[in-house]
Image: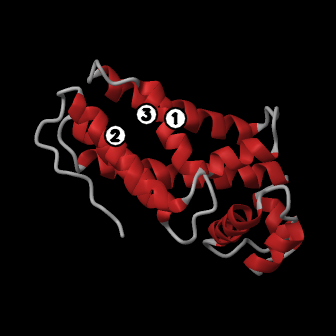
């Protein structure tokens, strides 16, 4: 009779795989690397994650939860939709400016596996669709704001140089201010 895994084993495996997947890409990481990093046996890994796609889906679900909590905190810190839009772009700017930032996990997966329709790809597309809908809702509350421009700025942050975060935040702040919808929002924090 197989002995039950220690509590937290699934989380240990998932955290190990998540770090590897984010740093090196899902395609480049083998299950043997995950086993080594997690310090578990092959049978234990496959008991929790029968296929690599299951592990990749769990990884993207984990990242989605982390990002959604960060976005919710950013939105909660701002009052009106104008402030929320600026706070959302500021959150992304701070994310991409972090030294360990290696790109958007969801965009990275879709780039590695173009055209895939597996569970990880569905999770990645759903996250991007949901965040775009969030921008659309905020822009709809600020009628002169074009959500396409905001989405392009956020996309540029994810794919551009890390030091462009303050510029992107300034653009969004100016966009909101130019249209007369800025109410009680302080100027963006400038990073050196």
Tell me the tag on residue 150.
3
Q: Quadrant of the N terminus?
A: bottom right
Between the residue at mark 3 and the residue at mark 2, the CA separation in whole angstroms equals: 7 Å
Residue drawn at (12%, 36%), measured in percent from left and top? Answer: 183
- When the figure is inspected, residue 100 is found, relative to residue 144, above or below; the finding is below
Tell me, yes or no, whether the two marked residues, 3 and 2, touch with CB atoms within 8 Å. yes
Residue drawn at (49%, 67%), measured in percent from left and top? Answer: 98
Residue drawn at (26%, 53%), measured in percent from left and top? Answer: 188
- Label 3, secondary structure: give it: helix
Is residue 185 shown left or right of residue 20?
left
- Label 1, secondary structure: give it: helix
Residue that lies at the very extreme toward the left in this rendered image: 184
- Label 2, secondary structure: give it: helix
Question: Would you say residue 71 is visible in this rendering?
Answer: no
Is residue 12 shown left or right of residue 180?
right
**Disc 1: which residue:** 152
Tell me, yes or no, whether the two marked residues, 1 and 3, touch with CB atoms within 8 Å. yes
**Disc 2: which residue:** 172
Between the residue at mark 1 and the residue at mark 3, the CA separation in whole angstroms equals: 5 Å
Residue drawn at (31%, 50%), measured in percent from left and top? Answer: 74
Closest to the observer: 3 or 190?
Answer: 190
Closest to the observer: 151 or 29?
Answer: 151
């Amino acid at each position: 009779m197989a002995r039950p895994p220690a509590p937290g084993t699934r989380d240990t495996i998932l955290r190990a795989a998540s770090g590897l997947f984010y740093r090196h890409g899902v395609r480049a990481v083998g299950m043997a690397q995950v086993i080594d990093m997690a310090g578990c046996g092959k049978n234990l890994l496959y008991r929790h994650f029968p296929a690599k796609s299951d592990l990749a889906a769990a990884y993207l679900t984990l990242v989605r939860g982390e990002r959604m909590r960060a976005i919710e905190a950013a939105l909660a810190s701002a009052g009106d939709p104008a402030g929320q839009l600026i706070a959302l772009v500021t959150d992304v700017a701070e994310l991409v400016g972090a030294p360990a930032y290696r790109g958007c996990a969801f965009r990275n997966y879709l780039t590695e596996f173009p055209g895939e329709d597996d569970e990880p790809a569905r999770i990645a597309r759903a996250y991007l669709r949901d965040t775009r809908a969030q921008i659309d809702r905020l822009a709809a509350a600020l009628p002169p704001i074009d959500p396409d421009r905001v989405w392009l700025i956020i996309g540029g942050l994810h794919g551009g140089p890390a030091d462009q975060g303050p510029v992107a935040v300034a653009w969004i702040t100016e966009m909101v201010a130019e249209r007369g919808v800025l109410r009680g929002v302080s100027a963006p924090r400038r990073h050196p």
